[in-house]
Image (spheres, grey):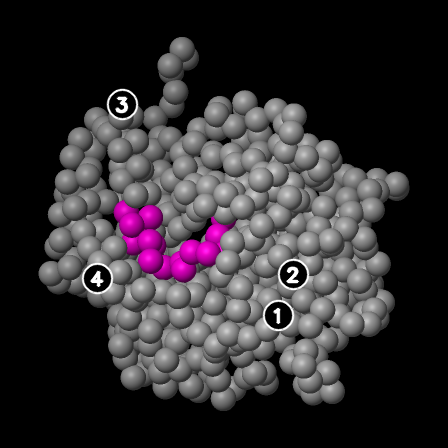
Amino acid sequence: MPDIHPIHPSQAAARNRSAAPWPLLWLVAILLFLLTGCQGETPAVVGTPAPAVSLSDCQIGTEGVSLRLSARCGTLTVPENPDDPAGRQIDLRLAVIPAVSRSPEPDPLYILAGGPGQAATETYVQISGAFQRIHQNRDIVLVDQRGTGGSNPLTCPASETGVDYSADSEDTQRYLQECLQSLDADPAFYTTPLFAADLERVRQALGYGKINLYGVSYGTRSALTYLKMFPDSVRAVILDGVVPMQEPLGIDVARDAQNAIDLILERCSTDAACSQAFPDIQQEFDELVAALREQPVEVSIVHPRSGEPVELSFSIEQLAVAVRLASYAPETAALLPLLIHKAGAEGDYGLLAALYLIVTEQLSDTIALGLNNTVLCSEDMPFMPLEEARRAGEGTYYGDLQIEALETACSVWPRGSIPADYKEPVQSSVPVLLLSGEVDPVTPPENAELAAQTLPNSLHLVAPGMGHNVIMRGCLPRVASDFIASGSVNGLDTDCVNEIVPSPFFVNFSGPLPLIAGE
């Protein structure tokens, strides 16, 4: 579930992607969350009990994934502006997957999606296997964040013009202004604190007492916000790919992306098969970055999803997006040395270009751009030291590609109000399990360590060689289940985490070399 978390699309890329016209602009935003600066008060906690929700049988899933899950779905109507309860109303889509047990525990697990801009009812199916143990005895509750999925989504219309959505482009501003005019919403009322207030309304409406939270990527910010606002409603929290409240995301994105690819290529250099196949992989990558900074390469390929011929100008922007998003998961990271070698040593850029198209289109299918913009332009950008962020990108393959795009987007998009203490660290004695991937290019382990400083009843686990979103890796589903069952970080058996290993590298298109017994 990436967040997300970046850059500016070329004219050729935009021309070939009229169904999703803003891949690189929002990729910048999706993996960060940078925004503007109005500050307000915490939204009022529900003053009267929320109405009960009527649930009916349904199936939940997401486009492109055949698996569907049976659930009980419904909607809860809430005011868009909590301070104007008689004003515009919006429906929140929610789903409850009842526990398997006939005598379930009273405290459910709420799943908070990433992005920002992903919908929990759409993305949960992809990670549901990690929660099978928890689901045996607890309900799973999914609430589409206001502005996503079935909760008045802030989606922008597709563009047929094929304009250049580069970060400093007037066309980008014009496109976002047209998007704003198309929305039946005031985007300023779609911030994370207002989502946290919605979650509390849902808790009351469903009749639960204390609840457990699992947040992934941006969803960890949602979980921490809810914990700060409604501490008495929370029993235990799992944070996977941690977004600490006090850090303005974006300042370290280039450094974190560089660190991830360095670790991936370093692992290749110490792996017998990978180092033999690609003995100069770090140099090849550095030279590839330098060459594309000088001049894009014109590439003709067959589109990996549509099968149609595609012409695009493959530039440093496209390379940066492809490498960064591929670094999120060990399965795609395992391909990077091979694809870098094909481009750098053999001049075959088609495979990297295809990877770029795959990862950007998959991500664009799941993100509500308007919600992403609201979060990015209300909760971090005011706290972003831009020149420091630009300097931090010097010497990295990612550079400052995202900064101008964020400034452009946030110069147009409305800013929501956030509480005056919003960026202060969350202090809580509630049990918190923090999960990180060693090679995470967007929320590295140091993020979790920062958050843990004010969470004294917490435990931080780092999955070796893993990237972003690690709940499904190795024994972590069992560890998470034990944590939720006990409601404590004490006594957990976590030695197995050190046995997690990343996917072996592809040394050719037949795949990794088979392991030899005894090795």
Per the model, the C-alpha gap separating discs 1 and 2 is 8 Å
Mark 1 to mark 3 CA distance (whole Å): 55 Å
Residue 401 in magenta stretch: no
Tag 2: amino acid: Met
x then y, percent, for residue 393: 24, 56
Above or below, 291 against 370 in this view is: above
Mark carried by residue 229: 2
- Residue tagged by mark 4? 315
Looking at the rendered image, the disc whose residue lies closer to the viewer, 4 or 2, is: 2
**Does the magenta run of residues contain 252?**
yes
Residue 18 appears in view? no
State the separation of the CA atoms marked 2 and 3. 51 Å
**Foreground disc of the pair 1, 3:** 1
Q: Nearer the viewer, mark 2 or mark 3?
A: 2
Label 3, residues with CA under 10 Å away: few <14, some 14-19, many ≥20: few
* Frontmost residue, 479 versus 236: 236
Left or right: residue 206 versus residue 469 is: right
Relative image position of residue 187 (x, y in whole percent): 54, 79
Residue range highlighted in magenta: 241-258
Between discs 1 and 4, the one toward the N terminus: 1
Magenta: main secondary structure equals loop
Q: CA distance from mark 4 to mark 2?
A: 44 Å
The label shown at residue 272 is: 3
Instruction: Give the residue displayed 75% in from the left and 75% down from the top.
Output: 77
The residue at which mark 1 appears reads as 42
Amino acid beneath label 4: Ser
Residue at 13 percent of width and 62 percent of height: 295
Count of marks overlaid on the render? 4
Q: Which circle's residue, 2 or 3, is located before the other in the chain?
A: 2
Q: Position of residue 420 (x, y in %)?
A: 53, 69
In contact (CB < 8 Å): disc 3 and disc 4: no
Q: Is residue 505 above or below residue 169?
A: above
